[in-house]
Image (tube, grey):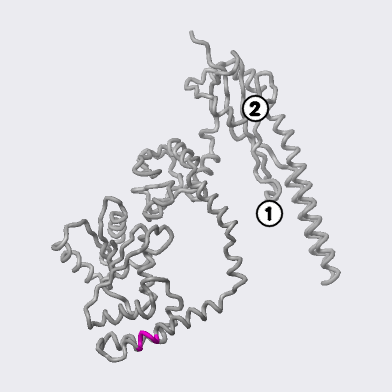
Amino acid sequence: MLLICHSPEEAIAIAPALQKLINIKMTLFHEHLSLLQRDRNASWFADADGARLLICSEIGSEGRNFQFCHHLFLFDLPPDPELLEQRIGRLDRIGQSETIEILVPCFTGSGQEVLVRWYHEGLNAFAANLPGAHQIHAALGAELRERIAKPHLAGLDDFISRTRTLREETAAMLQKGQDRLLALNSCRPDKARALQEAIAEMDNANELEKLMLKIFDLYGIIPEEIGKRTWQLNLSLLSQPGFPLPALKREQLVVSFDRRTALNHEEIEFLTWDHPMVTGAIDLMLGREKGNCAVCTLKSLEAKAVLLETVFILECVKHQRTQPDRFLPPTPIRIVTNELLEECSAVWPMQKLSAAARNDPYARLAREESFRLELLPSLLAAAQQQAEQQGLELIHTASERAAAAMDQEIERLHVLSRETGPAEEAIAALRSEKELLLDSLGSARLRLDSLRLIGSVPAAS
């Protein structure tokens, strides 16, 4: 349960008073605590085995999300309905799976009772979102404050009735002012459902988790599983100081690949394919030589048979201001060559080869001097030749697309010039850009990115 009151003094006084009456784990959250202590207390409250009650001041309704909690106790009520919405909004947000139960205590005949009736009977604020809260408060706020100060003032029922009428009129006005065309197109159910299913499928897949655990191992990060797809990272043996870690979480870094877990715990990093830690780690791995070579064995290979799997990257390096990546982004070209210098990528697709290959901890084949000096250079040369042929085809296709796109843009300027006047300068600039773009595509280069050497399993001695 989340208990919210107005001031830190109230929160501090409530905690010991409750401890005398009930024996449950509880904690505090208010502005007199340090930021670190507040984070620790909120984390303990979010833990399934942690505190059952969090007592917080008004600061608890600002910035902190507790959508895992389903019970809200409002020790007092703010006179501003927007602030009440803010309090309820700490629980009523994405990730909330239950109906929120709101408890509001009050004394009969008190100013608090006036507020409770005004919010409940007049604004229906405890049951539904309140549109136009600012306008309603601006119109009735002065009279409300007077009635709170003088709870026995006559005419409360009439005041609540006028509030209810104003709420209905404000809601109708806001609804009428809605752009219906925009509203109709804001959510297309079929596309939204397909997107939702795609996101759910991506969340449930474990490819990213497997990849990141391998990357952690590569750079000396020790993961300890502490929950469902949730890991605490030990960085004491980190081998790469430039590893992209969150700036403020180097002491106790916890990551999760489960969306619901991360939503319920703000201190946990939710890792997705576009998370800066993931993209940075992949860039770090791809930009360095560590891990770009492997030696394996394959049972199905005949004795003395050899496969060399290479991955070349075809990329444009000249005239980057022309954005050649629009037509030819960095493109991997995979080549598999056997000991006869034959290209056999179709026979050995990556998934098939990866599933069958086994690690060779002794790297026997790579240790043979005759192989390193004679066969390996020939295999690399044959792979390079095959990659160059495929690269020329990709460059040709990209150049045709680029030329067509630029010609279309030049023709568009010619047509526009008939209406707007001469455009020779802009057309000349486009022709120059086209020339530079085609030069950039034509000079794209191949770079050997990684290789894997696969040999037959040695006969038992």
The residue range painted magenta reads 158-162
State the image coordinates of residue 261 (x, y, percent, origin top left): 39, 50
Residue under pointer 2 = 336
Q: Residues within 10 Å of mark 2 (few under 14, many from 20)?
A: many
> Which residue lies most toward the top here?
461
Q: Is residue 324 above or below residue 211?
A: below
Q: Place residue 70 in its image quadrant.
A: bottom left
Task: Identify the residue at horizontal 72%, vertical 33% (top origin).
Answer: 388
SS at circle 2: strand
State the image coordinates of residue 81 (x, y, percent, origin top left): 37, 77
Location of the N terminus (image quadrant)? bottom left
Residue 159 on the magenta segment: yes
The one of 122 and 446 positioned closer to us in this rendering: 122
> Which residue lies most toward the right here?
418
State the image coordinates of residue 172 (x, y, percent, origin top left): 51, 80
Q: Please tell me whether the stretch drawn in magenta is mainly helix, strand or loop.
A: helix
Q: Which mark is residue 321?
A: 1
- Callout 2 amino acid: Val
